[in-house]
Image (cartoon, helix red, strand yellow):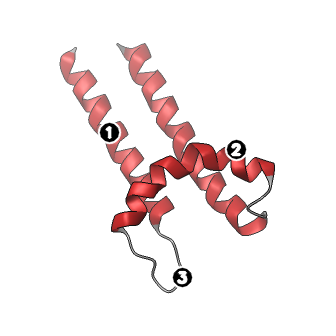
């Protein structure tokens, strides 16, 4: 079970890092850049539902931050459930 928990933790950490990188790339790269588009194919489907509920504040998009927090929260819940099973 510890191996499964380690794998799940790693997957969620990678997802959070990918969201962070996507956010940074949005400031420095053009939206037509192939790297930005590839990373966007992973991140955008997760951020679209969040953008429906989180409004922009003065042009700032807080959906990446909300997504990273949700991923961390979901990771904690899944790991707690798995630890409770054993």
Between 37 and 10, the one lying in front of the other is 37
The picture quadrant where one finds residue 84 is top left
- Report the residue at 42% width, 64% height from top: 51
Mark number, residue 76: 1
Mark 3 or 2, nearer chain start: 2
- Report the residue at 43% width, 27% height from top: 8
Residue mark closest to the camera, 2 vs 1: 2
Give coordinates of residue 73: x percent, y percent: 33, 46
Q: Is residue 10 above or below residue 43?
A: above
Mark number, residue 49: none
Q: CA distance from mark 3 to mark 1?
A: 31 Å
Disc 2 on helix, strand or loop?
helix
Give coordinates of residue 74: x percent, y percent: 33, 41
Disc 1 on helix, strand or loop?
helix
Q: CA distance from mark 2 to mark 1?
A: 28 Å
Q: Which residue is mark 2?
A: 38
Between 20 and 59, the one lying in front of the other is 59
The picture quadrant where one finds residue 71 is top left
Mark 2 or 1, nearer chain start: 2
Quarter of the image where the N terminus is located? top left
The local crowd at label 2, few if under 14, some if 14 to 19, many if 20 or more residues have their Cα within 10 Å, is: few
Mark 3 or 1, nearer chain start: 3
Q: Which residue is mark 3?
A: 59
Q: Can residue 39 be seen?
A: yes
58 horizontally vs 54: left or right: right
Residue reaching furthest to the left: 84
């Amino acid at each position: 079970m510890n191996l499964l928990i380690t794998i799940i933790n790693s997957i969620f950490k990678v997802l959070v890092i990918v969201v962070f990188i996507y956010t940074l790339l949005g400031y420095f790269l053009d939206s037509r850049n192939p790297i930005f588009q590839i990373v966007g194919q992973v991140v955008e489907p997760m951020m679209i539902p969040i953008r429906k509920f989180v409004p922009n504040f003065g042009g700032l998009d807080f959906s990446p931050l909300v997504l990273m927090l949700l991923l961390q929260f979901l990771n904690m819940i899944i790991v707690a459930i798995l630890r409770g099973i054993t």
